[in-house]
Amino acid sequence: MRHLVDDPPGEGAQVASRGGRPRIGQVAALAGVSATTVSHALNGRRPVSEATRRRVLDAIEELGYRPNVVARGLRAGRSLTIGLVIPDITNPFYPVLARGLQDVLGPAGYDEIVTNTNGERDLERLALDKMISRQVDGIAFAVFHTHADDLRPVVDAGIPVVRLGGRQALPGVDLVHSDDEGNAAKAARYLLRGGYRRIAFVCGPGADGPAAERVAGYRAALAEAGVAVDPALISQTEFSRAGGAAGVGRLLELPDPPDAVMCANDMMAIGAVDAARERGLRVPDDLAVVGFDDIEAASLVTPQLTTMANPAREIGRAGARLLLERIAGTVTGPPTEVIIPARLVRRQSA
Amino acid sequence: MRHLVDDPPGEGAQVASRGGRPRIGQVAALAGVSATTVSHALNGRRPVSEATRRRVLDAIEELGYRPNVVARGLRAGRSLTIGLVIPDITNPFYPVLARGLQDVLGPAGYDEIVTNTNGERDLERLALDKMISRQVDGIAFAVFHTHADDLRPVVDAGIPVVRLGGRQALPGVDLVHSDDEGNAAKAARYLLRGGYRRIAFVCGPGADGPAAERVAGYRAALAEAGVAVDPALISQTEFSRAGGAAGVGRLLELPDPPDAVMCANDMMAIGAVDAARERGLRVPDDLAVVGFDDIEAASLVTPQLTTMANPAREIGRAGARLLLERIAGTVTGPPTEVIIPARLVRRQSA
DNA sequence: ATGAAAGCGCTAACAC
DNA sequence: GTGTTAGCGCTTTCAT
């Protein structure tokens, strides 16, 4: 004899999932169809009669159902997520990069998960591991220490990777970067056209990376114009305002000082202006200054900086396109390299 | 008679998963234990003999196994992901906020997925929907249009939400913001101590939001010092450099112009300096200028801006802490409000 | 046009 | 200390 016995919860009936969120089974029950049909009504992978579709849609509406992307991802083997690994989102270059990626990724249904590594190699490796664990469908990364070994696990896992910025191509990794050499040459030619002849270059520490490319472009442009390159005019210093000021300060002590200076980034260029001012030199009349990147501050300082705009947003977009192609499998060959040209922003300092 | 018949793939044997990534079953097979044991060796939820643990760890190492966080999340009902919804990562305030969140969330094992809404209400709603679909464990958002209705689905889904910046508390939503009123008062008192008496306030369009708080603090500080508030000295304009210049320009045309001006943000303050210069006024001698936010450019312009630092990173951190507490269930009451004080950064403009 | 059932990779009962 | 089994929420054969 059975009496006063409630159905034990979870038996037979469709029970709300954790957090009270409805799941596909509840929608199905309310619409009087199977979960399969709800799925197809939603994804359109097979025909569903108009009447059924309506009932399903109504049920979804009524329950406020939202499909669980995690479950879908587990089933489908893709997460509709891409990982962005960068040194520090607080550095103004990276937000723009991130936005460029989203410009392209968002409409394609992908979301971005962002990790900062502070430029530390260990954290970079951990970040990559985490991305694999999270089943991202692709990785965009813009980091300092890029040892090919660190990327091996990712490439082995079959995850498309694109490197943003930097130079060295890595096996199995697409690359998008600005044309550092060409851009530096462009800037140098601009100065040459302006009549400057003793053009200095203030670069950062370390002989490789973008700095080296920029120096090469600078040399090439001078050579092309028949101007001798004076090694004394190439100054190595820190990538900061103080670094720029110090580097240019030294150049200005030279017996035959420069009449123009190119700096590896805008902060250094701002420092260069400081140094000129300290010595009572007018910019650009006594010393022309050109920066790199076109950070926001470049148009805010006095005099406003003439600079090569770093096409960060374009780099992000191009990277995202590459990633989507690899994910879709429409591109399968060896690594691609995309070079994004920059434009010279003429302002007051040169 | 059976001959030359290979085992059909997938029958019995542990097969590599998609993308060639090993899964827990393979580790188990290699270590000669069950998947459960591998799981426990990894998560430490129940004792595993030292010998077994070693074999498991070796197998993991050998195969390069990384647990699938998506599957784990589906099972556990949490994704170890939090959603960040902001207008535009390109606006320098938000990257700092994002970083503050990561400072706290990262060590706790959470990752951040970021969405830009361009400040459009429709996109904000879509972003929230997406976050629900993605099973985020919490949402941090900093947006313009915050109609309580838009957040209903999220709150109903049982997802903790914290609003970053802004003022209006929403039902079921924690709030972290800077003390706009107190900060403005702080800045005004600083000017009063400096002997300034005709202090103007340049605010943005719209009577509500942080601008209103700041105006209130400004009034309060003047009143407290026994200085009458002249309504003519409160100027409404755009939140931009040009807006600041225009607003201050108008104030300077007054028969009895101000000797100091507080601007609702740093860009406006930079514009204020422009306007003063145009009229041959020296800053801070003829006109003191105070900004709000302490954006990077504030220390780059000449004269360097005195400004109230917007404690974006602290706001992010506090928001993350709140979120973690709600997720953990250690806090369950009604919405909390956390107010982060800002500090005055004394530089040259005041 | 629609359903039933299996399974994505993992962990938590429930055994022993 | 360890294994077996079931199930998280979804999509996809395979059947009807």
Image (cartoon, coloured by chain):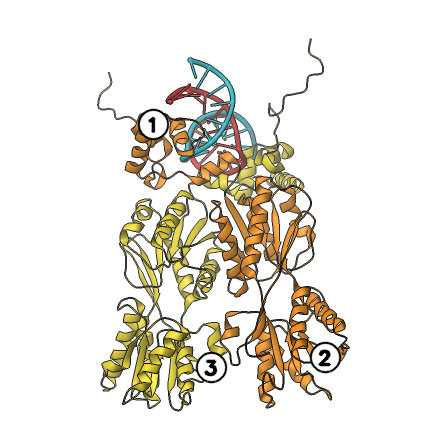
Chain colours: A orange, B yellow, C red, D cyan
- Chain letter behind tag 3: B
* Residue B176 in view in this figure: yes
CA distance separating discs 1 and 3: 66 Å
Residue depicted at 34% across the width and 75% down the height: B183
Left-right relation of B46 to B28: left
Residue linked to disc 3:
B304
- Chain letter behind tag 1: A
Q: Position of residue B67 (x, y in %)?
A: 55, 41
Q: Nearer the viewer, residue A231 or C4?
A: A231
Q: Nearer the viewer, residue A287 or A168?
A: A287
SS state under label 1: helix
For the C terminus of chain A, the quadrant is bottom right
With respect to residue A109, does B289 lie above or below?
A: below
Q: Residues within 10 Å of mark 1 (few under 14, many from 20)?
A: few
CA distance separating discs 3 and 2: 31 Å
Q: Amino acid at mark 2?
A: Leu
Q: Nearer the viewer, residue B166 or B269?
A: B269
CA distance separating discs 1 and 2: 76 Å
Q: Position of residue D2 (x, y in %)?
A: 56, 32
Image quadrant assignment for residue B219:
bottom left
Residue linked to disc 2:
A233
Q: Position of residue B166 (x, y in %)?
A: 32, 63
* Residue A9 in view in this figure: no
Mark 3 and mark 2, same subunit?
no
- Chain letter behind tag 2: A
Residue most extreme to the top: B1
Residue depicted at 29% across the width and 56% down the height: B335
Image quadrant assignment for residue B35:
top right
- Which label sits on residue A50? 1
Image quadrant assignment for residue A21:
top left
Q: Amino acid at mark 3?
A: Gln
